[in-house]
Image (cartoon, rainbow, N blue to C red):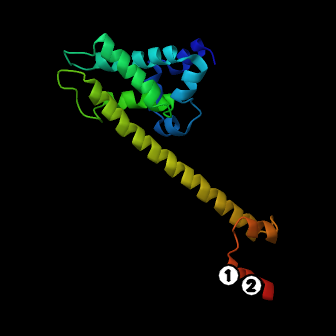
Amino acid sequence: MTKEDFSELYGVPKQYLYSLHEERCHSGNAPTIAQIVEELGLDFCMDWVKNFLLDLQNFTSATRHLDANQLRQVCFIVTTQFRRLKVTEFMLFCIKAKSGEFGKFFNTIDPMDIITALRRWQSSCDALTARRFEEELREKERAERVAAHQGTITYEQALERGLIQEKWREYLHQK
């Protein structure tokens, strides 16, 4: 993906569109921050994050904003410490921050407030990912049990996959 393609797909104005489909922000095929750093470079990713932070900052009524050094540091922390977030999850975070989900910025935008909120957000994203993985695993196991029951896999395959428990093995062999 080129920098232009990425900016077109995941630019600041797109955060509103992606926020309409929260589940897809978590489960879709959007790249992670780590993938963007690897593919397009750290500086590019930091600039991308910066655009979202400036947009968030301009949304608030806070009178004290992040100075250039704080902004650079927050961008660096986001791109290095929150690498497993999908870019759409970060975009959704910005929308949720604007909607007050992580509290209000009182007269100042504090870097620690942003990082703390982002840490909570990453934890909730991780929990969603874990639940989705467990559901997919349960569905796969269910499909395998159905396949074993319908005879589309052999008895030996069912044993290998743990679909037939050891206590039933003897019973089945006695018949």
> Horizontal and vertical percent for residue 2?
62, 15
Q: Disc 2 to disc 1, how far (Cα)? A: 6 Å
Q: Is residue 89 above or below residue 170?
A: above
Quarter residue 40 falls in: top right
* Depth check, front residue: 24 or 112: 112
Q: Quadrant of the C terminus?
A: bottom right
Q: Is residue 61 left or right of residue 38?
A: left
Q: Residue at x 53, y 49 (%)?
A: 132
**Which quarter shows the N terminus?**
top right
Amino acid type of the residue that numbered disc 1 sits on in the rendered structure: Lys
Q: Residue at x 56, y 50 (%)?
A: 133
Name the disc covering residue 167, or none: 1
Residue type at the position of mark 2? Glu
Q: Quadrant of residue 56?
A: top left
78 sits left or right of 150 in the view: left
Q: Is residue 48 left or right of residue 158?
A: left
Residue picked out by circle 2: 170
Query: Where residue 3 sits: x, y (%)?
Result: 58, 13
Nearer-the-camera pick, 154 or 8: 154
Using the image, tell me which numbered label, if any, was put on residue 117. none
Secondary structure found at label 2: helix
Q: Position of residue 115 (x, y in %)?
A: 33, 30
